[in-house]
């Protein structure tokens, strides 16, 4: 199993999960997993319509302060979006999660 991981803050959007949850985001063959100590939640690929890495101006997050090194993984779901914030540049996040962005990236024209 191939795994890519980065520290992140979960900003919300996945039903039943607390906003503002910080930890490690693992992206692997099963989906997107958020860990902190023993607490975690998973978003299986079957729930994901598509993924995108965005800058702050491409994300609906009015309470988030702009930083020099900042990127967002926007996970588009059937019933909304789950958003993760990274203290990395969008280029660094795209490089780390590249295989999954290729497999689950935005639909053409999206």
Image: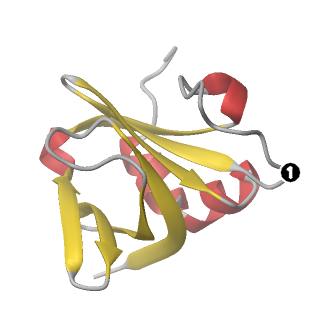
Based on the displayed image, in which of its 4 quarters is residue 11 positioned? top left
Where residue 92 appears, as percent x and y from the top left, is 71, 62
Q: Residue at x 86, y 51 (%)?
A: 68
Based on the displayed image, in which of its 4 quarters is residue 86 positioned? bottom right
Q: Can residue 30 be seen at all in this image of the molecule?
A: no
Where residue 7 appears, as percent x and y from the top left, is 53, 71
Where residue 102 appears, as percent x and y from the top left, is 47, 48
Query: Does residue 98 appear left or right of residue 21 in this picture?
Result: right
Q: Can residue 60 be seen at all in this image of the molecule?
A: yes
Q: Relative to 10, is 22 above or below?
A: below
The foreground one among 99 and 77 is 77
What is the secondary structure assignment of the residue under circle 1?
Answer: loop
The foreground one among 65 and 104 is 65
Q: Relative to 25, is 110 above or below?
A: above
Colour option used? secondary structure
Q: Residue at x 35, y 46 (%)?
A: 19
- Sort mark 1 into few (<14), some (14-19) or many (20+) by Cα contacts within 10 Å: few
Query: Does residue 88 appear left or right of residue 62 in this picture?
Result: right
Q: Residue at x 77, y 39 (%)?
A: 66
In the displayed image of the protein, which residue is found farthest to the right? 68
Residue at numbered disc 1: 68
Please identify the quadrant where the N terminus is shown.
bottom left
Query: Does residue 67 appear left or right of residue 73 in this picture?
Result: right
């Amino acid at each position: 199993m191939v795994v890519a991981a980065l520290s992140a803050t979960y900003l919300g959007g996945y039903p039943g999960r607390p906003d503002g949850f910080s930890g490690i985001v693992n992206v692997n063959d099963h989906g997107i997993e958020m860990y902190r100590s023993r607490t975690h939640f998973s978003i299986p690929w079957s729930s994901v319509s598509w993924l995108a890495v965005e800058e702050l101006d491409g994300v609906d997050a009015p309470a988030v302060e702009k930083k020099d090194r900042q990127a967002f993984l926007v996970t588009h779901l059937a019933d909304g979006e789950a958003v993760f914030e990274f203290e990395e540049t969008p280029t660094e996040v795209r490089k780390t999660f590249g295989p999954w962005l290729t497999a689950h990236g935005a639909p053409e024209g999206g």
